[in-house]
Image (cartoon, coloured by chain):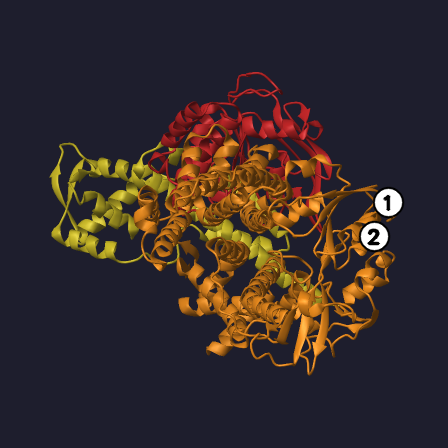
C-alpha cells in the first residue's frame, strides 16, 4: 500500500477493529432537489456494504460524500479518525489517490489512454517510475483476466473489458476502501458476474472495505450487509454482518 | 420527407440545440463572414491598384509632341517641396490656348491662385501654415476633387504660374491629362511572393478558423443526430441536416460579409501599404466575382461539413467513428522529396537552370518551391503525430502522458495548426530573406563623410538655377535662426542630386528655421537636412524595411488567428470530455496535473511548428538563393521574433484555456440520479 | 410430474440403484428441501407401471432401494419429448409469497416496509447462494443463478406491486374530498 500522511501501514484484515468510515447526519441539496436529508452510517474495516435504493434516493450522493468528492451541506464524514472537511484539497486528492479506489457505471476511463496507461496512472501520480508502474498495472490486468487488451485504447474496448480495467485501476494502489457506483449497470449478466466476482475476490484477499451502490438485489447479495436509502435517509438497516 | 422540410428540420435542430450549438453557429458565421470579406478584399486589390494608377497617369499628363506642336498645351512644372518631414507635390501650371485641365479642378489656376487638396487646405489654415504659404503663392481658389487625388488625405497643390516665371523653359508641355493604357509591368518575383504571402497569411488562418468552428461540439451534435437516426432518418438525410446547419450559418455570414468588407475598406484606406494609399471606393471587386463569392460561401461551408461527416457512421446507437489514425500517405513526403531534389539540382547547376528561356526557370524554381511547401503541409502533421506518440510512450510524467495521448488520438486539429504555421514560416522566411537581400544590395547612403561631419542641424541647400546664386545665399544669411552660410563646390549627394551651386547652412536646428530657409529658396532650390538626404536616396531599403514589417504583421496576424483556433479546439475538447475528467478528479488526479496536460496539448504542436517551420524556412531560403545564384541571407532576426511570438502565444492560449480545466472537473456529473 | 421426468433423466446415461437416485436428486435438485424416499419409490413404481423404466437386477435382501433401475426406449422417447417442451408459466412454491404480499398490501401496510422486510429475508438466502456460486463449480453456479434470478424477480415484483398499489391509493385519495 502506498502511504499517505494520514497513517502508517496498519494491519488490514477483515477483523480490523473500529469503524473505518463514519458519516453523521449528512445533508445535501442540489438546487431545489434534496439528495441527502440527515443520513448517518458506519462502515467497519474489511466489510462489504451494499447501498440499496430506488433511483433518485441519494445513494450516489452518499457515496460521493463518503469519498470526499462532494462536501455535504451539513454533517460530517470521518475517515480513520479524521474529518474529511478539515483536510486540505491537496490532502484529500492524495487520499483518494492512495487509499480509495473507484468504480463507476460507465465513462470512467480516459478514452485515448491505453488500459495500461489508465491503470498505471494512480501509481505514476504517487511517484512510481513509469516502468514499475506499468509492470504492476499489467499484473492486475492479468488478474482481472483482461491482459489481452492491455495495449488497446480504452475507447476501443467492449464494455465488459473496460469495466474490468476500471476495477484493476481501482485496486492497483491497494486501497483501503473501494467505492463502486452501479459497477455492473451497463453490463450483461455474465460480464456483470465476472466483474463482481473479481472485485469481491480481490477485496477479500486484501481485506479491502467495499461500499457498493446498486439498485439490484443480485448485486447487493455480494455484500455482507445492505443499507437501504430512501428519500435521502436511511431505512431500517437489516441483515447481519 | 422532402428536402425542403428536412432543411427546415435541420435549421430548427440547430437553433434549439442549446448554448453550445448557438455558439458554434455564431462562430462559424463570423469566421465565414471574415473569410468572405477577405476574399472580396483580395479580389479588389487589382482594381484598386489599377484605379490609382489611372489617376496617377492622368494627372501626370501626356507630353505634347515637339514637332508641329499644337498651340493648345498646358505647361506643367514640378516645384515640389518638403514641409515638416513630409513631401508635398506643388505643380505650377500655365495654359496656352484651349489648354487641357488636370483632373480634379474646374479650370487652370490663374496667376495668384492656387487649387489645393482638402488636406493641404487644412494644413495651410493651421498654425504652422504660414511657414508653408510662401511656397504656394496665391489665394486658395478651390479644392482638388477626388479624381485628382490618389488617396483621401493626400497633400497636393496646383499653383497658377506668375507672369514672370519662364515656365516654358522649366516645365513640360502637356497635350492632355487622361488615363492611357500603359503596358502592365511584370511584378518582380519578390513583389509577387510578398503579395502571395500576404494573401495566404490572411486566408489560411481564416480557413483554419472556419474548419475548426465546424468541428466544435462535435460529439454532442453527433449524439443528437444519432437520436434522429433512431427516429428513422437515413445516413444521407442526417448529412443533409448537418448541411442545413452549416448553410444557415453561411447565409448569416453572407449578410455580414458585405458590411464587413465595406468597413474593412475604410480601415485599410487609412493605412500606408507597400508605400501606397487608396480611397475606400477604389476597392471594388468585379461584380461577377462578388456574386460568386457570396454564393460560394454557403456551398463551401456545406462542403466542409459533408466532408467532415464522411468518416462518420451515424448509427441509431450512437457514433462510430472509423479509425482516425492519420494515413501514412506517401504522397506528401514524395512531393516534399521531389521538390527538394529539384531545388538542390537547381542549386548545383544554376547556369543550366537560369540559362533556359524566360518562363522556364521561374516555372522550375517556383514549381519546386510550391511542391516543397505542399509536401511540408502534408508531411508535418504526420511527423507531429509520431512525436506525440513517442512522447506518450516514453514521456516522464503523467501530465505529459495525458496531453500527448490526447494529441495522438485527435491529430487533425493540432496537425492543421502545425502545418499552417510551418508553411507560413517557410514563406515568410523567404520573403524576409528577399527583403534582407534588397536591403543589402541597396548601396548604403550616398552621403559622403564630410557631410556627416557637420552638425546635424545643418541644412544643405542646392540651387537649381544658374543665376542669382550668391544673392540667394546672401538672403539666407538673414533668415532668423541661421548662424552662417558656407558656399560649397560639391553637392553632398556625391554624383546624384541637383546641379548648380550648393551651400551648407549652419542653423539653430529649429524646424521652423528649416521651413523658412525653404521658403527663401522656394522654386529655385532645394533645402534638406542630412537625414532627409539619407532617406531620399535609400528608397529601395525603406521599401524593403516596409516589406519586412509587413511580413512581421502577417506573421503576428496568422499566429493570432491560429491561437484562436487552437484555443477553441482545446476548450471544446475539455468540455466534451467532462465525464472522464470528473472521474480523474475523483480518483485523485490533482488539478495541477490536468493543467499541465493542457499546457502540453498546446505547447507541443506549437513547439513542433516552430522547430519544423524554422528548419523549413532556413532550408528553403538556402536552396532558393543557391538556385537563383545569389548569396544567401538568413532571416535570423525575424525568426527570433517569431519564436518569441509563438512562445507568447503558447503562454496566452494556455492561460485562457486553464479555467476550463477546473470547470470540466466538476463532480456533479458523477451522480447517477 | 417433474420428479418423474427428472428421475428418467438421471437414468438416461446409466442404470442406477434406488438409493443412488435419491442421493443424486437431493444433491443436484434438492436445494431447499430433500425429497422423501417414499415419493421417489412411488414415482419409480408409477414409471415402471407406464413402461418407462424397468428393473435390471435386485440385490439380495433388498427393498426398493436395492433395486437396479434402467430406462426403457419408451422412457427415453418420453424424456426427449419433455425436454423439448417449455415449462408452464406458473411456478411451484410461489403461491405462498404471492398471497402474503397481496394480502399485506391490500390491508394498507406501507409498501416499502413489506418490500424491505421481504427483501432482507431474501438477501440472506441470496448472500449464501452468491458465496456458494463464487466458490463452487459450474453445476453450483447454474443452480445458484437459477434461484438467485427468481428471488430477485420476487423482489422486483414486490417493488412494482407496491408502486401500483400506492399509485391507485393516491388517485383514490385525490378523488375523495
* Residue tagged 1: B481
Percent position (x, y) of residue A179? 54, 35
Label drawn at residue A91 = none
Secondary structure found at label 1: loop
User: Could you tell which of marks 1 and 2 lies nearer the N-terminus?
Assistant: 1
Question: Which chain letter goes with mark 2?
Answer: B
Chain seen in orange:
B
Left-right relation of B31 to C148: right
Percent position (x, y) of residue B491? 66, 46
Q: Can the viewer see residue B182? A: yes
Q: Nearer the viewer, residue C148 or B303?
A: B303
In the rendered image of the structure, the colour used to display chain C is: yellow
- Distance from label 1 to label 2 (Cα)? 9 Å
Chain seen in red:
A
Q: Which residue is drawn at 26% across and 37% down?
A: C24
Name the quadrant containing residue B392. top left
Label drawn at residue B516 = 2
Q: Which of B324 and B89 is in front in this view?
A: B89
Secondary structure found at label 2: helix
**Circles 1 and 2 in contact, beta carbons < 8 Å:** yes
Q: Can the viewer see residue B585? A: no
Q: Residue at x 67, y 47 (%)?
A: B533
Query: Callout 1 environment at 10 Å: few (<14), some (14 to 19), or many (20+)?
Result: some
Q: Nearer the viewer, residue A126 or B384?
A: B384
Amino acid at each position: 500500500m502506498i502511504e499517505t500522511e494520514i497513517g502508517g501501514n496498519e494491519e488490514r484484515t477483515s477483523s480490523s477493529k473500529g469503524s473505518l468510515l463514519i458519516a453523521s447526519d449528512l445533508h445535501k441539496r442540489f438546487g431545489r432537489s434534496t439528495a441527502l436529508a440527515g443520513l448517518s452510517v458506519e462502515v467497519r474495516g474489511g466489510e462489504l456494504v451494499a447501498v440499496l435504493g430506488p433511483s433518485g434516493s441519494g445513494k450516489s450522493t452518499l457515496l460521493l460524500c463518503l469519498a470526499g468528492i462532494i462536501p455535504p451541506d451539513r454533517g460530517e464524514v470521518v475517515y480513520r479518525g479524521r474529518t474529511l472537511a478539515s483536510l486540505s484539497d491537496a490532502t484529500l486528492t492524495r487520499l483518494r489517490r492512495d487509499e480509495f479506489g473507484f468504480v463507476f457505471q460507465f465513462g470512467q476511463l480516459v478514452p485515448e489512454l491505453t488500459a495500461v496507461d489508465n491503470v498505471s496512472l494512480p501509481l505514476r501520480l504517487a511517484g512510481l517510475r513509469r516502468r514499475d508502474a506499468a509492470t504492476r498495472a499489467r499484473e492486475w490486468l492479468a488478474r482481472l483476466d483482461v491482459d489481452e487488451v492491455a495495449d488497446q485504447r480504452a475507447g476501443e474496448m467492449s464494455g465488459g473489458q473496460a469495466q474490468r480495467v476500471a476495477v484493476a485501476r481501482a485496486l492497483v494502489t491497494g486501497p483501503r476502501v473501494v467505492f463502486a457506483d452501479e459497477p455492473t449497470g451497463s453490463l450483461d449478466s455474465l460480464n456483470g458476474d465476472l466483474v463482481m466476482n473479481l472485485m469481491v475476490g480481490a477485496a477479500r484477499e486484501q481485506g479491502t472495505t467495499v461500499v457498493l451502490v446498486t439498485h439490484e438485489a443480485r448485486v447487493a447479495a455480494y455484500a455482507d450487509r445492505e443499507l437501504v436509502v430512501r428519500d435521502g435517509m436511511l431505512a431500517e438497516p437489516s441483515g447481519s454482518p | 420527407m422532402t428536402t425542403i422540410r428536412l432543411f427546415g428540420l435541420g435549421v430548427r435542430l440547430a437553433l434549439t440545440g442549446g448554448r453550445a450549438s448557438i455558439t458554434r453557429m455564431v462562430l462559424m458565421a463570423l469566421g465565414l463572414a471574415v473569410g468572405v470579406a477577405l476574399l472580396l478584399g483580395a479580389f479588389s486589390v487589382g482594381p484598386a491598384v489599377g484605379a490609382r494608377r489611372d489617376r496617377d497617369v492622368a494627372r501626370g499628363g501626356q507630353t505634347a509632341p515637339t514637332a508641329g506642336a499644337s498651340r493648345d498645351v498646358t505647361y506643367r512644372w514640378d516645384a515640389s517641396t518638403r514641409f515638416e518631414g513630409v513631401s508635398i507635390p506643388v505643380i505650377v501650371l500655365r495654359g496656352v490656348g484651349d489648354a487641357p485641365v488636370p483632373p480634379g479642378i474646374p479650370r487652370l489656376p490663374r496667376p495668384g491662385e492656387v487649387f489645393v487638396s482638402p488636406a493641404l487646405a487644412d494644413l495651410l489654415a493651421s498654425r504652422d501654415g504660414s511657414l508653408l504659404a510662401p511656397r504656394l503663392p496665391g489665394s486658395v481658389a478651390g479644392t482638388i476633387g477626388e479624381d485628382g487625388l490618389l488617396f483621401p488625405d493626400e497633400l497636393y497643390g496646383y499653383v497658377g504660374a506668375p507672369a514672370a516665371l519662364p515656365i516654358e523653359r522649366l516645365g513640360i508641355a502637356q497635350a492632355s491629362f487622361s488615363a492611357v493604357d500603359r503596358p502592365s509591368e511584370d511584378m518582380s518575383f519578390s513583389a509577387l511572393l510578398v503579395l502571395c504571402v500576404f494573401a495566404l497569411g490572411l486566408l489560411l488562418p481564416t480557413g483554419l478558423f472556419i474548419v475548426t468552428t465546424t468541428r466544435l461540439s462535435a460529439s454532442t451534435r453527433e449524439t443528437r443526430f444519432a437520436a434522429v437516426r433512431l427516429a428513422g432518418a437515413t445516413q444521407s438525410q442526417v448529412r443533409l441536416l448537418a448541411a442545413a446547419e452549416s448553410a444557415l450559418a453561411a447565409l448569416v455570414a453572407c449578410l455580414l460579409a458585405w458590411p464587413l468588407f465595406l468597413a474593412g475598406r475604410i480601415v485599410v484606406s487609412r493605412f500606408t501599404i507597400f508605400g501606397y494609399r487608396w480611397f475606400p471606393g477604389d476597392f471594388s471587386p468585379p461584380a461577377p466575382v462578388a456574386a460568386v463569392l457570396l454564393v460560394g460561401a454557403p456551398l463551401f461551408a456545406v462542403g466542409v461539413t459533408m466532408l467532415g461527416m464522411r468518416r462518420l457512421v451515424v448509427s441509431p446507437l450512437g457514433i462510430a467513428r472509423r479509425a482516425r489514425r492519420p494515413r501514412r500517405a506517401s504522397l506528401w513526403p514524395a512531393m516534399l522529396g521531389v521538390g527538394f531534389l529539384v531545388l538542390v539540382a537547381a542549386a548545383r547547376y544554376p547556369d543550366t537552370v537560369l540559362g533556359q528561356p524566360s518562363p522556364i526557370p521561374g516555372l522550375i524554381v517556383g514549381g519546386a518551391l510550391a511542391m516543397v511547401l505542399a509536401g511540408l503541409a502534408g508531411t508535418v502533421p504526420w511527423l507531429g503525430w509520431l512525436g506525440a506518440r513517442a512522447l506518450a510512450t516514453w514521456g516522464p510524467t503523467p501530465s505529459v502522458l495525458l496531453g500527448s495521448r490526447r494529441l495522438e488520438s485527435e491529430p487533425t486539429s493540432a496537425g492543421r495548426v502545425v502545418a499552417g504555421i510551418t508553411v507560413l514560416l517557410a514563406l515568410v522566411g523567404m520573403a524576409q530573406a528577399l527583403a534582407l537581400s534588397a536591403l543589402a544590395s541597396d548601396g548604403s547612403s550616398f552621403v559622403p563623410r564630410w557631410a556627416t561631419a557637420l552638425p546635424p542641424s545643418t541644412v544643405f541647400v542646392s540651387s537649381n538655377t544658374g543665376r542669382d546664386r550668391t544673392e540667394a545665399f546672401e538672403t539666407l544669411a538673414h533668415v532668423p535662426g541661421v548662424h552662417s552660410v558656407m558656399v560649397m563646390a560639391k553637392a553632398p549627394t556625391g554624383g546624384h542630386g541637383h546641379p548648380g551651386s550648393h551651400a551648407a547652412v549652419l542653423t539653430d536646428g529649429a524646424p521652423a528655421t528649416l521651413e523658412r530657409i525653404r521658403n527663401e529658396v522656394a522654386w529655385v532650390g532645394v533645402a534638406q537636412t542630412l537625414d532627409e538626404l539619407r532617406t531620399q536616396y535609400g528608397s529601395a531599403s525603406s521599401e524593403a524595411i516596409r516589406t519586412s514589417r509587413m511580413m512581421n504583421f502577417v506573421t503576428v496576424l496568422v499566429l493570432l488567428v491560429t491561437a484562436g483556433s487552437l484555443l477553441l479546439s482545446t476548450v471544446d475538447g475539455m468540455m466534451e470530455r467532462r465525464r472522464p475528467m470528473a472521474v480523474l478528479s475523483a480518483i485523485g488526479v490533482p488539478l495541477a496535473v490536468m493543467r499541465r496536460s493542457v499546457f502540453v496539448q498546446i505547447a507541443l504542436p506549437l513547439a513542433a511548428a516552430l522547430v519544423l517551420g524554422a528548419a523549413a524556412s532556413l532550408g528553403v531560403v538556402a536552396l532558393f538563393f543557391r538556385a537563383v545564384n545569389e548569396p544567401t541571407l538568413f532571416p535570423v532576426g525575424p525568426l527570433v521574433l517569431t519564436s518569441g511570438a509563438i512562445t507568447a502565444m503558447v503562454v496566452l492560449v494556455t492561460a485562457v484555456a486553464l479555467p476550463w480545466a477546473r470547470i470540466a472537473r466538476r463532480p456533479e456529473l458523477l451522480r447517477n440520479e | 410430474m417433474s420428479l418423474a421426468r427428472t428421475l428418467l433423466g438421471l437414468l438416461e446415461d446409466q442404470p442406477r440403484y434406488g438409493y443412488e437416485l435419491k442421493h443424486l436428486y437431493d444433491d443436484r435438485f434438492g436445494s431447499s428441501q430433500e425429497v422423501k424416499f417414499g415419493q421417489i419409490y412411488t414415482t419409480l413404481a408409477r414409471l415402471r407401471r407406464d413402461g418407462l423404466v424397468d428393473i435390471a437386477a435386485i440385490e439380495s435382501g433388498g427393498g426398493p432401494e436395492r433395486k437396479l433401475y434402467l430406462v426403457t426406449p419408451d422412457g427415453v422417447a418420453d424424456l426427449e419429448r419433455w425436454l423439448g417442451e417449455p415449462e408452464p408459466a406458473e411456478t411451484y412454491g410461489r403461491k405462498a409469497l404471492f398471497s402474503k404480499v397481496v394480502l399485506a398490501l391490500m390491508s394498507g401496510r406501507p409498501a416499502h416496509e413489506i418490500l424491505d422486510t421481504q427483501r432482507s429475508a431474501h438477501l440472506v438466502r441470496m448472500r449464501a447462494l452468491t458465496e456458494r456460486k463464487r466458490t463452487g463449480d459450474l453445476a453450483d453456479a447454474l443452480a445458484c443463478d437459477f434461484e438467485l434470478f427468481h428471488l430477485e424477480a420476487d423482489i422486483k415484483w414486490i417493488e412494482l406491486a407496491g408502486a401500483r398499489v400506492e399509485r391507485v391509493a393516491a388517485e383514490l385519495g385525490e378523488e375523495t374530498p
